[in-house]
Amino acid sequence: MSFETIFREVFKALARNRLRTLLTMLGIIMGVGAFICVVSVGNAGSSRVEEQLHNVGDNLIWVEAGSRAKSGVRVGSRGTKTLVVGDSNAVIEQIPGVRSASPNVDGRLQVVYGNLNWGTQYRGVSPEYFDIRKWVISAGAAFTQDDVDHNAPVCVLGNTVASSLFEDEDPIGKTVNVKGVPFKVIGILQAKGFSATGQDQDDFVVIPITTAQKRISGVEWLDDIYFSAVSREAIPETTKQIISLMRERHHLRASEDDDFNIRTPEELIRAQLATANIFTWLVGSAASLSLLVGGIGIMNIMLVSVTQRTREIGIRLAVGASEQDIQWQFLGEAIVMSLMGGALGVLAGIGGAFLLKNALHWDMLLSPQVMLIAGVFSAAVGIFFGYYPAQKAARLDPIEGLRYE
Amino acid sequence: MNPSGPNALSSQETSPASSTGHAVIAVEDVHKTYDLGETKVHALRGVTLSIRRGEFVAIMGASGSGKSTFMNIIGCLDKPSSGRYLLEDTDVAQLDKKQLAGIRNRKIGFVFQGFNLLARTSALENTELPTLYARIDRAERHQRAVDALNMVGLSERMDHFPSQLSGGQQQRVAIARALVNRPSILLADEPTGNLDSRTSVEVMGIFQNLNNKGLTIILVTHEHDIAQFAKRNIIFRDGKVRRDELITTQSIASEVLKTMPTVEE
């Protein structure tokens, strides 16, 4: 029998039992649909974590002023006053694994422009900060080391602050007032939107560290320091070196705890990413199990069908069908059912993904690879689970088949 | 009738004579034993006969006489346990399953007692079925099926499903299906068993027509009067040929029909 003839006969046979065909395909449709939905959700989760990874900074090692127990009272994080610019400079001078550093202070302040004012957070940083955090200036420019050296009253505004104070005006070059000090707006940061935890990531003002210390806070100590390691691989070793240097500089005895916190968020996020990927795989395998169950459903129906159609098989054999012809007929039915089920499943999966997106506001990331995998997988299911019933049909004795009532 | 139908077969009679002469079927000392575990059933115990081209043979016998087994072997649905079966000088025992399927497809047309049509499949598609397994293109397949249905007088009902046809009409579809690949022999196993007497005679009329055009027909029946429409009767008993005789006064279906009361179909 030619391929075209087999195809035609397969479709005729499937069309003769439309309901059964549809019900048989249902297992595959649901399996493929669930697989696509689940993997889309998982992919979206992973890509969000990856985005976080991108946002966190360039091989970031973060040192934060820590807590200290003093006569039984433990002050919380940032309670110490021991973290200073000298620490930052010492680290960058003595530890080769550190490429750049930005000592920072932060706090709250009120920014006034004309008759508008806005309460926000400020960060006093060095110019390296923008590179370390991969922050992009969308208008104007960042301040320079020169500004830091001269305690220049300049500021870069977060998008929220800019839009709150300057509705239609161009803020660049304008002067805002902070605690009676006029600050010149030199740049606007590109908006980053809300974080995964719902924080507005654009509601702050960035000023030079020296300006912050001398003109705003009036203190010498730092809240934190951002270090950028030369490479991701260098992070663990560099972290150890920073710890020992800091302890030495802070004159801590071996029995004393660190008076600072050191974190490498990138590693945390990478671990998170690995978890997210494992989760995707896990749920994906669970969904593909349902595809397997769908395949077993096909086999089940095909076996029933072979028995039901014993007489038909007998007739076909009697009028000259070879075993191969019969085998191809039944295998073809299984493959066509699983492929059609797979195609409908892809549609169901896409539909389901959009439904979840709209109903639950989950992120979805449909990838063509996943659909290809689902398609190939369902064809494989058809061949695998159709083979045995097809062989059973082909091995039938025509005399038995013709006698079958 | 269609000129490219079974009458085209008669030209083959000029093929060179072999050791078996013009025999389409030559069976020599054929035994068939079924092994049912503990016991062995001897269905055929040494059958030797030959059937020449253009014969119309009725095979008779009680159930268990071996006539069905014999038909299955003749139809290449089964193989003899021992002995030789030559179909058009081909030793069937030498053929593999695929070649046997090819023989069934091209050289033999089957007609069964229970019609054995595919349900929910039109008369035309049922007739077309054997052509699917032959190397024939689609247009030709369709044409042959139409011709075959014309030959049995069913051109008006090609699109009907078996459930929409009477028994006689269903059997005619089955005959059309048996003829569609232009076989050398037509094997009919109790073709009138499910039909009333008038329809039975009509079917025998179709057979006689086909036989007159040169088609070799082998008919299994247990009805004596049906066997009288053939030209030769072979009676089986206990797995052997008991009697093999030519019919001297063959019943002619068209004449018998005249004597029968017409029944509304």
Image: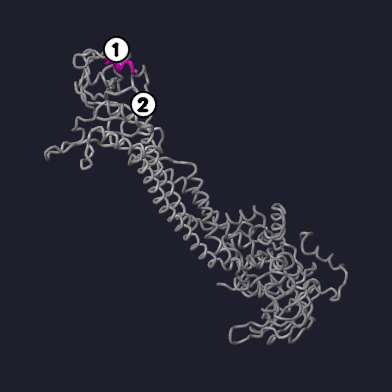
Q: Of helix, strand and loop, which one carries label 1? A: loop
B156 within the magenta span: no
What is the three-letter code of the residue carrying label 1?
Answer: Lys
Q: Position of residue A403 (x, y in %)?
A: 59, 73
Badge number at residue A135: 2
Please identify the quarter of the rendering in which residue B72 is found.
bottom right
Identify the residue at horizontal 55%, vertical 55% (top origin): A335
Front-lying residue, A360 or A40: A40
The residue segment tinted magenta is A145-154
Q: Is residue A191 left or right of residue A111?
A: right
Q: Position of residue A292 (x, y in %)?
A: 46, 57
Residue at image mark 1? A174
Q: Mark 1 packing: few (<14 Cα in 10 Å), some, or many (20+)?
A: some
Locate the C terminus of chain A by quadrant.
bottom right
What's the residue type where badge 2 is placed?
Trp
Which is more foreground, mark 2 or mark 1?
2
Residue A345 in view, yes or no: yes
